[in-house]
Amino acid sequence: MRTAIFPQTNTSRELADTYGYHEWMIGRFLEYMPDVEKCLAIMESPSSAFIRANTLKIDPKSLVSLLKARNIELEPTKLPEVYRVVSTSLPIGATPEYLAGLYYIQDISSCIAVEELDVLTDQLNLDMACAPGGKTTFMAQKMCNSGALCAIEHNRRRIPSVIFNLSRCGVLNTTLYNFDARSVGALNMKFDRVLLDAPCTCEGIISKDKTRKTSHDPSDIEELSRRQLEMLLEATKNTKPGGLIIYSTCSFAPEENEVVINELLEILGNSIIVEPVHSGLPGLTRFGDQKFNSNLSRTARLYPHLHNTVGFYIAKLRMR
Amino acid sequence: MILYREPTRQELTVLRRSFDQWGIFEHVLDKEILINEKKMKGSKIKEVYLTTKDSYKIITENPSLSYIGMLVGYLKRRGFVPSMAGADLIARVGEKFPFVMVNRTAEALVLYGRDIMHGSIVDYGNVGRNNTTLIILNENKVPIGLGINTVSIGKDIPILDKRIVIKTVVDAGYYLRNERWTDE
């Protein structure tokens, strides 16, 4: 599907000039994003930092006490393991507690994706694009280090970061593979839970990486959208009946989000159910002149200016 | 592709004895132990991994993987030597393992791979003769490294404060010093 581009307007030009974006990106934002300028302004500042207590090693309350002694002040969030860093006198990625794997620095949006996956102990689960291992380690934590968790990472250079984080967090139940997740059928396994945090344009993390304002063009969105659908189709083929799939991206682009799910629903029809995600704004049911399956309103969009997260999309799919 | 194998009977005996000494024998009982042999600088290294029974089943059918479970240490001629992850496991679930606890100043130094002087030690346990491999804890009992005592440590043994008594072998800051990994 071609990336939708909208006619230039004074507003799109002005916002693009003010915040240093491609004009076509702003034109698209104006089509679906509430209060675009507020979002752009918020993304100029670093996003809130969140940490997730690693309950394989420590209970959250003890972690809060340990970090308080280092003048790191934390604030609870809607997830019991996750805290927002209110203030800190030292880098949170260099404390002995971090190095010992007592916590993981991870945006709450990523944690919500894993929370929605409803991971249980003794399951056989899959993470299809695992580097650097944040969601994998959270899944292992939710599984209480039991059962088996297969983690796949296509990029060989990112494998060491996954191993470091698995090791640091005390994860025992994971097998790590280096291949393209579109070939996951080669493992010849059916999984209870599948997480596909798909490779994307990362428009949602502009607050962390300003190069994302201009680093991609419409053809990148088209290429990624095609790849994301292929990965998601492979996920559906390897999930047990009744099993759950979480599809997520850190992109705002509808072609990487609702369009992918809409095409999947057109291909698979009744064999898949879209279940509600309990965070964020409802997913889009139309974009430009495209109208999507009404069940896409059960998917979720998280926006920096509304939800104090990075930009994120989550769809929860259950196999019949 | 890495090929993991089950330990031989002889290796298993050595490992079980070592796990017992480190106080983690019971904890390891329901886990699978795997060995990965590597050649490094001409010599053979035996890495010891722990994983779940379910994960082990997977690799019997799909052996072409990059990594499994947790690298808990190395099997050497004299027995099992923990890795940093192994030291962490021992500190959390082990009993009667040799340790030293260091003050906050030494904590920062250990995380840069520096050795420990006697004056930095605030507590110790189960450390007797020299050349004992021991776990270095900070004052909150968080494992931050693994060391070897170069002299005996005990109440009756006089040691000058400025003397190095623990040689740091591995520390939790090692990964960050060598590479910047990014979190999400």
Image (tube, coloured by chain):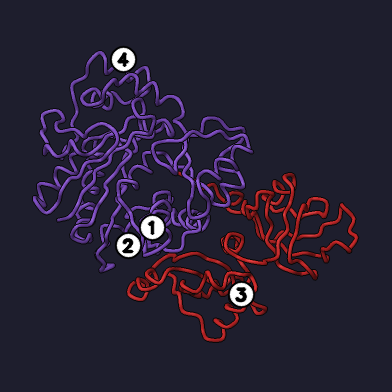
Please, what is the three-letter code of the amino acid marked with disc 2? Gln
Number of residues whose C-alpha sits closer than 10 Å to that of mark 3, classed few (under 14), some (14–19) or many (20 or more): some
Three-letter code for the amino acid on which mark 1 is drawn: Met
Q: Are marks 2 and 3 in contact (CB under 8 Å)?
A: no
Q: Earlier in the sequence, mark 4 or mark 2?
A: 4
- Image mark for residue A73: none
Q: Which chain is red?
A: B
Q: Position of residue A108 (x, y in %)?
A: 40, 39
Q: Amino acid at mark 4?
A: Glu
Disc 3/disc 1 C-alpha distance (Å) = 27 Å
Q: Are marks 4 and 1 on the same chain?
A: yes
For the residues beneath circles 3 and 4, the answer to whether they share a chain is no
Query: Residues under labels 2 and 3: Cα distance?
Result: 30 Å
Q: Which mark is residue A143?
A: 1
In front of the other: label 4 or label 2? 2
Q: Residue at x 77, y 60 (%)?
A: B166
Few, some or many residues within 10 Å of mark 4 (<14, 14–19, 20+): few
* Quadrant of the frame with the C terminus of chain B: top left
Q: Which residue is mark 2?
A: A123
Q: Are marks 4 and 2 in contact (CB under 8 Å)?
A: no
Give the residue displayed 81% in from the left and 54% down from the top. B117
Chain assignment, label 2: A
Letter of the purple chain:
A
Q: Are marks 1 and 2 in contact (CB under 8 Å)?
A: yes
> Badge 4 is on which residue?
A14
Q: Is residue A199 left or right of residue B177?
A: left
Give the CA distance from mark 3 to mark 4: 69 Å
Q: Nearer the viewer, mark 3 or mark 4?
A: 3
Q: Amino acid at mark 3?
A: Asp
The image quadrant of residue B118 is bottom right
Labels 4 and 2 within one chain = yes
- Distance from disc 1 to disc 2, alpha carbons, whole Å, reads 7 Å
